[in-house]
Amino acid sequence: MAPLSGPDVAKHSDKESCWVVIHGKAYDVTEFLPEHPGGMKIILKYAGKDATAEFDPIHPPDTLDKYLDKSKHLGPVDMNTVETVEEVEDPDETARQQRIKDKPLLSQCYNLMDFESVAKNVMKKTAWGYYSSAADDEIVRKVSNLTVPALFV
């Protein structure tokens, strides 16, 4: 199967026919749009384009394989022909990149709270929101944070 071209993918850039490219592969997400937990708007921003940079920080690697029917996996795309979304320079992102450069060494993190503190400082806000949230009300997480230190006293 020959790779799809960027112009082929770009034809599918609205809610009637919405394709996105993630990791060099095209996916038809048209039917999924109304179900997306983050809303349609963010997917439509990347409709017909490469969405990898937005997708990766907040989705586990197997998300598309698990939740999108195989018939919606359209195949490889010639990435030299795909339109990218122009991102304007964001001062918050510039500051985050500096925090990444300044983060402590892995050997300097001794417990889960150390890792959490570093992650909170270096992850994008959307990614941090996803990974730091709990399934329901975070009661187990809060109780664990209170009781684990007591075990080591």
Image: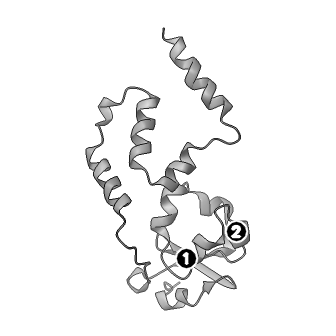
Give the percent coordinates (x, y) of residue 149: 51, 17
* Residue annotated with mark 1: 45
Front residue (pair 86, 108): 86
Whether residue 61 is visible: no
Front residue (pair 17, 70): 17
Q: Amino acid under label 1?
A: Lys
Q: Nearer the viewer, mark 1 or mark 2?
A: 1
* Residue annotated with mark 2: 69
User: Circle 1 — which element?
Assistant: helix
Residue found at the very far front of the displayed protein: 91
Tell me if 34 is positioned left or right of 51 in this view.
right
Q: Residue at x 38, y 26 (%)?
A: 110
Give the percent coordinates (x, y) of residue 77: 48, 80
Q: Are marks 1 and 2 in contact (CB under 8 Å)?
A: no
Q: Earlier in the sequence, mark 1 or mark 2?
A: 1
For label 1, count other residues whose C-alpha is less than 10 Å away and answer few (under 14), some (14-19) or many (20+).
Answer: some
Is 135 above or below relative to 149? below
Q: Residue at x 38, y 48 (%)?
A: 122
User: Circle 2 — which element?
Assistant: loop
Give the percent coordinates (x, y) of residue 16: 70, 85
Q: Amino acid under label 2?
A: Asp
Is 120 above or below relative to 145? below
Q: Residue at x 67, y 70 (%)?
A: 70
Q: Residue at x 67, y 61 (%)?
A: 37
For label 2, count other residues whose C-alpha is less than 10 Å away and answer few (under 14), some (14-19) or many (20+).
Answer: few
Residue 33 occupies which quadrant of the picture?
Answer: bottom right
